[in-house]
Image: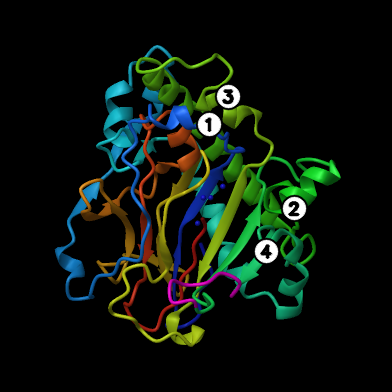
């Protein structure tokens, strides 16, 4: 789940974003295969933009597919798949009108600040150094572009489908970030497990249908073996990864405002998995949802013409982004894009999210 609600205190603000990553082992292709790619590979490098320039960054809405269209396997969605995921797309599209999604999103996101507010000794028990903090609670373990520890966000990682994806010790030792067991706060916050798994399964199920239509599009352009399409990769994988994020207020994180940093919440990167599902961000003050107080905050994507655009989508939509694994296996007909999340500077605020 590359899977985001909340309890507010006076004068506090929370932002939540949920994302679910669908990952599968990357297949190494022979050198001759690389010459056949149509990929417009973009190197991910440090990019910045002053706060004064932010309003001039163009804003765009995502390509959207309705849920009734998506579940129709006879529907030809190749034009929308190409527009969103193709070589000239932004590497993102959204699915609208998914039954039950809004409630499941609310159920999970409201738990994020409660998780972050647990006593430090409880959160310490939820940490997993053996997986490089890719299961359970992680705060301050990642590095910002500056090389400093990222204190702005806390993350909770789990496999939303399988608590124990494998018992094979060699696999666990070689891939600890994916093959390890889940760690849940069963006594401190038991409802987290139920909410996390419910939303994660829904995003995976919808993502599998997105993958089906991706396969239909790609199969017109290259030969795909029946069991090697993106849909089958997702259905066979036992190592899906969900990440619930909590964005702390910068003032309480001992982080000074960096007006030159566009990627202040989540640095520029390209997803390495197959497919990423995420929810729209949410801001709250005193337990009441409010509009984002900073129009510059949000998701930014770098296009294949080196233009940076801000991407927006509705709170009732699930967004899906292509990862590098899918780009490699599709020989570039599906393209991943560099993206980042810019921080809100609307006041003395707290924020939460999930990725």
User: Which label was assigned to residue 29?
Assistant: 1
Tag 3 residue: 232
Task: Classify 125 as above or below 193.
Answer: below
Callout 1 touching callout 4 (CB < 8 Å): no
Q: Earlier in the sequence, mark 1 or mark 3?
A: 1
Residue 112 visible in the shown view:
yes
| Residue 323 image offset from top left, x and y in percent | 46, 42
Q: Residue furthest front?
A: 32
| Residue 74 image offset from top left, x and y in percent | 40, 11
Name the element at disc 2. Answer: loop
Which mark is in front, 1 or 4? Answer: 1
Name the element at disc 3. Answer: helix
Judge left or right: residue 268 versus residue 294.
Answer: right
| Magenta-tinted stretch | 140-147
Tag 2 residue: 182
Q: Residue furthest top?
A: 74
Callout 1 touching callout 3 (CB < 8 Å): no
Q: Earlier in the sequence, mark 2 or mark 4?
A: 4
Residue at position x 36%, y 55% from top?
339
Residue 128 visible in the shown view:
no
Tag 4 residue: 133
Q: Nearer the viewer, residue 320 or 171?
A: 171
Q: CA distance from mark 1 to mark 2?
A: 32 Å
| Residue 70 image offset from top left, x and y in percent | 41, 25
Task: Classify 110 as above or below 249.
Answer: above
Q: Earlier in the sequence, mark 2 or mark 3?
A: 2
Q: Would you say residue 49 sits in the magenta stretch? A: no
């Amino acid at each position: 789940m590359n899977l985001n609600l909340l309890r507010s205190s006076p004068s506090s603000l929370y932002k939540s974003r949920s994302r679910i990553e669908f990952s599968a082992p990357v297949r190494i292709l022979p050198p001759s295969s690389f010459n056949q790619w149509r990929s417009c590979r973009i190197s991910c490098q440090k990019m910045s933009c002053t706060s004064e320039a932010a309003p001039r960054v163009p804003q765009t809405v995502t390509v959207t597919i309705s849920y009734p269209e998506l579940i129709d396997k006879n529907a030809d969605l190749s034009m929308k798949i190409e527009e969103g995921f193709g070589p000239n797309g932004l590497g993102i599209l959204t699915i609208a009108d998914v039954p039950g999604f809004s409630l499941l999103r609310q159920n999970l996101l409201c738990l994020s600040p409660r998780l972050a507010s647990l006593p430090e000794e409880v959160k310490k028990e939820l940490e997993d150094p053996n997986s490089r903090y890719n299961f359970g609670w992680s705060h301050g373990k990642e590095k910002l572009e500056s090389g400093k520890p990222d204190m702005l966000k806390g993350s909770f990682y789990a496999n939303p489908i399988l608590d124990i994806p494998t018992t094979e010790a060699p696999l666990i030792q070689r891939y600890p970030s994916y093959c390890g067991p889940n760690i849940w706060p069963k006594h401190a916050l038991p409802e987290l497990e139920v909410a996390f798994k419910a939303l994660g399964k829904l995003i995976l199920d919808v993502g599998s249908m997105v993958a089906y239509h991706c396969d239909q599009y790609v199969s017109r352009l290259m030969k795909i073996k029946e069991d090697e399409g993106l849909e089958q990769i997702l259905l066979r994988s036992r190592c899906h990864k969900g990440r619930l994020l909590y964005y702390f207020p910068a003032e309480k994180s001992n982080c000074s405002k960096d007006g030159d940093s566009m990627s202040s919440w989540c640095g520029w990167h390209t997803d390495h998995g197959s497919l990423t599902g995420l929810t729209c961000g949410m801001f709250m003050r005193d337990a009441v949802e409010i509009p984002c107080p900073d129009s510059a905050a949000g998701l930014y994507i770098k296009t294949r013409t080196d233009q940076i655009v801000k991407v927006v989508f509705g709170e009732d939509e699930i967004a899906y982004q292509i990862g590098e694994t899918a780009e490699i296996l599709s020989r570039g007909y599906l393209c991943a894009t560099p993206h980042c999340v810019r921080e809100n500077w609307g006041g003395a605020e707290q924020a939460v999210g999930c990725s």
